[in-house]
Image: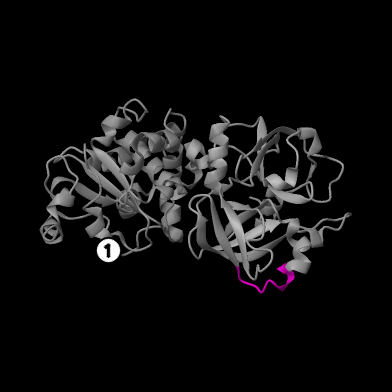
């Protein structure tokens, strides 16, 4: 896996006198995108645009197509395929006060022999134009960004705005220019990724969708991850490896995260206003685990054709919180459960991160009366009109791993033959799914 520095250097290129950000659309290897700003390219003729990586002046990146936004200072260039970077560049919407970095080629560091990329630490400020642009507030004094030194920042135009998470990077936007060159102080501007997607859609090109939304292939190696001690790893390692092997059945099916997202959209969430989180990789890792468990429990395999029928019986609801899910039963009860069969439906809740080691993984029947005592009847979204905690069974998604696997360590230890492991898991998951 590439290091953080290697990932950033793969993304950053020089576009004429400015910068650009390489993005690989997950649906093709025939071309790559370079996201940049309109004032960098100055021409809509591909042959007039000079793009290089770092100090490599010998291999100019060939531009195939130039796509310019009519009113905003953004552009997308399609170029020769830039190869497999060895990582998936996720995209996301920048949120208020989020810690970000602009990474590109500022002019003051661009030695003609050895240009040096660098970054600026900042955080997301207020929206300038909703879903189009936003303020970025530098966390360092920007004395070098006053009017006499504006040339220093010129090379940064077109740079990617990233969020760093350990060795992972998430593309949050593109940096176009200073907010107010006459009195910039510590504020600059960023363009949201969504405005680039609008430009791509108009030109019938694939959106900036992370690879994990295009195929479950990118998720199978992390499926069924469990926090285990040394002895548990030895006892359950073979079982977990088998589950990842079974996950390949979902990868090879016609189901994809995007197909599920497009079909059910807001119904996948506890909070319908939380649609940005449908791109979160954890949502789709949870879906892969649920679909794999269903495939093991029954004869009929999951597919795009029968997913709606499955949706009548099972729901996976995402809740964007690091809290224990039991802290949010008040909001969970008001989620949309229309179409879920009364008395048969099962709801799995996925939170941001694992459930706590001591956290409850299911909602016992004797607790329902107490939890469902205080509620607004008119806000309920069930076909029967009664309370969802009375109509359906509720589980945290980690039930599939912790309750069905880790808590059955004794009976699963020593199983090495695939048929024996399959039968043991089938018995366990059948108790849950019926």
In the structure shown, which secondary structural element does the residue marked by tag 1 occupy? helix
Horizontal relation, residue 61 to residue 275: left or right: right
Seen as rendered, the residue at the extreme right is 113
Residue nearer the viewer, 22 or 158: 158
Q: How many marks?
A: 1
- 432 up-or-down from 371: above or below: above
In this picture, residue 315 sits left or right of residue 144: left
Q: Nearer the viewer, residue 361 or 272?
A: 272
Is residue 114 in view from this perspective? yes
Q: Position of residue 191 (x, y in %)?
A: 58, 52
Position of residue 334 measured from the top left corner of the image (x, y, whole percent): 22, 52
In the rendered image of this protein, does residue 69 appear above or below residue 133? above
Q: Residue at x 56, y 29 (%)?
A: 204
Measuring from the top left, give residue 211's x and y in whole percent. 54, 40
Give me the residue at 34% from left, 34% from top: 295
Q: Give the residue displayed 83% in from the left and 40% down from the top.
A: 59
Write down the region rendered in magenta.
138-146
Quadrant in the picture for the C terminus: top left
Which one is nearer the viewer's eye here, 350 or 189? 189
Q: Is residue 423 left or right of 70 when viewed as pictured? A: left
On the image, which quarter does residue 227 sit in? bottom left
Q: Which residue is mark 1?
A: 327
- Is 144 magenta? The answer is yes
Residue at horizontal 74%, vertical 70%?
A: 144
């Amino acid at each position: 896996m590439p290091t953080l520095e290697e990932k950033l250097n793969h993304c950053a290129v020089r576009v004429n006198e400015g910068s650009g950000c390489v993005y690989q659309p997950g649906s093709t290897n025939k071309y790559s995108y370079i996201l940049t700003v309109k004032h960098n390219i100055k021409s809509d003729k591909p042959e007039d645009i000079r793009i290089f990586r770092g100090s490599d002046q010998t291999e100019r990146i060939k531009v195939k197509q130039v796509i310019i936004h009519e009113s905003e200072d953004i552009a997308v260039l399609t170029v020769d395929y830039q190869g497999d970077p060895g990582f998936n560049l996720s995209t996301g919407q920048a949120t208020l006060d989020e810690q970000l970095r602009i990474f590109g080629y500022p002019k003051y560091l661009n030695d003609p022999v050895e240009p040096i990329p660098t970054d600026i630490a900042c955080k997301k400020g207020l929206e300038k134009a909703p879903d189009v642009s936003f303020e970025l507030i530098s966390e360092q004094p920007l004395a070098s960004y006053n009017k006499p030194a504006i040339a220093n920042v010129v090379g940064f135009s077109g740079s990617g705005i990233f969020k760093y998470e350990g060795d992972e990077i998430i593309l949050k936007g593109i940096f176009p220019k200073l907010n107010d060159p006459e009195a910039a102080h510590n504020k600059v501007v960023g363009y949201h990724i969504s405005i680039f997607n609008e430009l791509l859609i108009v030109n019938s090109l694939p959106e900036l969708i992370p690879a994990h939304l295009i195929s479950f292939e990118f998720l199978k190696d992390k499926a069924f991850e469990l926090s285990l001690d040394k002895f548990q790893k030895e006892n359950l390692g073979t079982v977990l490896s088998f589950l990842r092997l079974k996950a390949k059945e979902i990868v090879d099916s016609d189901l994809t995260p995007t197909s599920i997202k497009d079909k059910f959209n807001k119904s996948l969430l506890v909070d319908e206003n939380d649609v940005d989180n449908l791109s979160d990789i954890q949502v789709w890792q949870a879906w892969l685990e649920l679909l794999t468990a269903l495939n093991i429990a029954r004869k009929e395999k999951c597919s795009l054709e029968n997913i709606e029928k499955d949706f009548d019986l099972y729901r996976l609801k995402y809740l964007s919180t690091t809290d224990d899910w039991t802290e949010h039963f008040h909001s969970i009860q008001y989620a949309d459960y229309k179409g879920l069969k009364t008395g048969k439906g099962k709801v799995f809740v996925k939170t941001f991160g694992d459930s706590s080691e001591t956290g409850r993984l299911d909602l016992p029947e004797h607790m329902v009366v107490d939890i469902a005592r205080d509620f607004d009847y008119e806000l309920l979204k069930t076909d029967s009109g009664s309370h969802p905690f009375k109509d359906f069974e509720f589980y945290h998604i980690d039930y599939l791993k912790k309750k069905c696997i880790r808590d059955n360590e004794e009976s699963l230890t020593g199983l090495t033959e695939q048929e024996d492991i399959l039968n043991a898991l089938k018995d366990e998951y059948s108790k849950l799914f019926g």
